[in-house]
Image: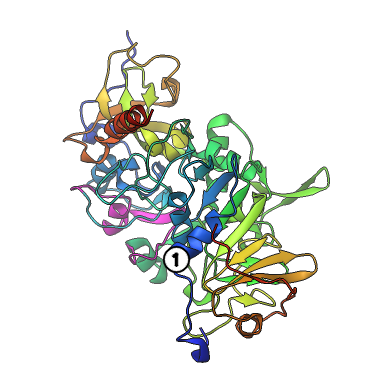
Amino acid sequence: MAINKIVANLEEAVADIHDGAMIHVGGFGTIASAPSQLLEAVSRLDVKDLTLVSNSGGFGIEIWGEHDIAVLHQTNKVKKHIVSAPVNPLIINDLEKKFRAGELEMEMVPQGTMAERIRAARAGLGGILTPVGLGTVIEEGKQVIEVDGKKFLLETPLKADFALIRAYKADRWGNLIYRGTSRTFNATMAGAARITIAEVEEIVELGDLGPEEIITPGIYVNRVVKRTGAGKASDDYDEVARRAAEKKAKEA
Amino acid sequence: MLEKFADKFRLDDQTMALRVANEFSDGDVVNLGIGTPTLASNLIPTDKEVLFHSENGVLGYGQICTAGEGSHDLVNAGGQPVEYKPGMCLLEHSESFAVVRGGWLDYTVLGGMQVAENGDFANWMVPKKKVGTIGGAMDLAMCSKNVIVLMNHMTNKGVFKIVKEVSYPFTGHQCVDMVITDIAVIAVTDEGMVLKEVAPTWTPEEVQECTEPKLIIPPDVKDVQLA
């Protein structure tokens, strides 16, 4: 039986997400890097008490007809949010409102520490040692370990039940490539969960993605689902690279 | 700003960004924080090769694109589309922070709330708010070779931001090397804060009035150096 990780639709991709699940949500905070269609599919499930791990708390506004992670706060799915950039100066988001109202728990994490805790889960490490956060609120309740006379904080791995990520192209083995800065936490979170689900612009034949270009090996990915609609957020990246090359040729 | 100086000339955001851009040399690896610091990527002379790093996973990007141009798959940490540049490369997030934590950044430029005379730094949360965005600031402030803080010299209400001791939640300890404000450039040294440059029309004594710790004022204080 050949390997085939492609599932028919978004509903099937997220069907087994359950009450109390811990979920990595990929992307940086921009809509183009967010697994926005998977997030919408989860928002339609009858689940509660989720723990989310993400870089951003989201804006909670619809962009190009798509939602960011705030859609899960708006639909009251979340018990706890582990996050690096929960709030932003532009808007008071749903996370901030709910946190202030005492309706959810939040754990604030420096961004590099978050990335490395996630990588540690995928890489089978028992934790990581980082100098970041020493002498700040981040140190509270954590073990300080000295190595060669330098102090570090012990930070534990973040292993989730599910990882929802966004990629550009996938093959049926789950090999992934990304576009531009939309690689971000998507590639970091792949494999750092029991089940990794990738939402992609395009599904290509096995072999179309060359070994030199594959960023995420398919073994980290359990399910691949093709996005519906045009994917407006991403369709201009190649054009930018093309125009840059054109400009360079003109200047030469 | 103090009431008595309210009508005095102050550097605008673009000029502060231009001043910080003047610090960088060929081959420097530089991270620009969200807000005013990001403007500096547009203000580098074309013959200077500075590698701008952004937390979201790009090294060597170009200028911020004109509104409506560029791609949302190539953005800086502020989410602004930036230009593709030959030699640029992309990094997943833990690799992007390996660059930060590993000490590969020559300069980090961050916005600030408070800088103390010993280089202590706070920039992520006003205490009464109980929630703030740390983002990449702690990694960047604690692990870069040089940390430059770009901020207004005082709050709008005339409260000191350059202080004897930080009272807000810490971003990092003794990590700031230089402060560039709307009225001055100050170096943080082992001896204390040294006033290096003042904005046009400002005297060192006036800058001191806007600064809580005692400044070291050498005889050769210059006007702000923009080139």
| Residue A229 as seen in the image, left or right of residue A106 | left
Q: Nearer the viewer, residue A151 or B182?
A: B182
Which residue is drawn at the image coordinates 61% and 84% (left, top)? B206
Q: Is residue A85 magenta?
A: yes
Q: How many marks?
A: 1
Q: Please name the amino acid that badge 1 sits on.
A: Asp
Of the 4 image quadrants, the one containing the C terminus of chain A is top left
Question: Can residue A156 be seen?
Answer: no
Q: Nearer the viewer, residue A62 or A172?
A: A62
Residue B81, percent from left and from top: 34, 46
Of the 4 image quadrants, the one containing the N terminus of chain A is top left
Residue A27, percent from left and from top: 38, 43
Residue A13 position (above or below residue B40): above
Which residue is drawn at the image coordinates 27% and 45% (left, top)? B69
Query: Image quadrant of residue B205?
Result: bottom right
| Residue A221 as seen in the image, left or right of residue B201 | left
Determine the residue located farthest toward the right in the rendered image.
Answer: A149
Q: Check disc 1 and report its element: helix, strand or loop.
A: helix
Q: Nearer the viewer, residue A46 or B214?
A: B214
Which residue is drawn at the image coordinates 38% and 25% (left, top)? A176
Query: Image quadrant of residue A232?
Result: top left
Question: Can residue B27 be seen?
Answer: yes
Residue A179, percent from left and from top: 35, 32
Chain under label 1? B
Q: Nearer the viewer, residue A142 or B219?
A: B219
Q: Is residue B173 magenta?
A: no
The magenta-colored residue range is A64-93
- Mark 1 Cα shell of 10 Å, populated few (<14), some (14-19), many (≥20): some
Determine the residue located farthest toward the top in the rendered image.
Answer: A1
Determine the residue located farthest toward the bottom in the rendered image.
Answer: B4
Residue ID for mark 1: B13
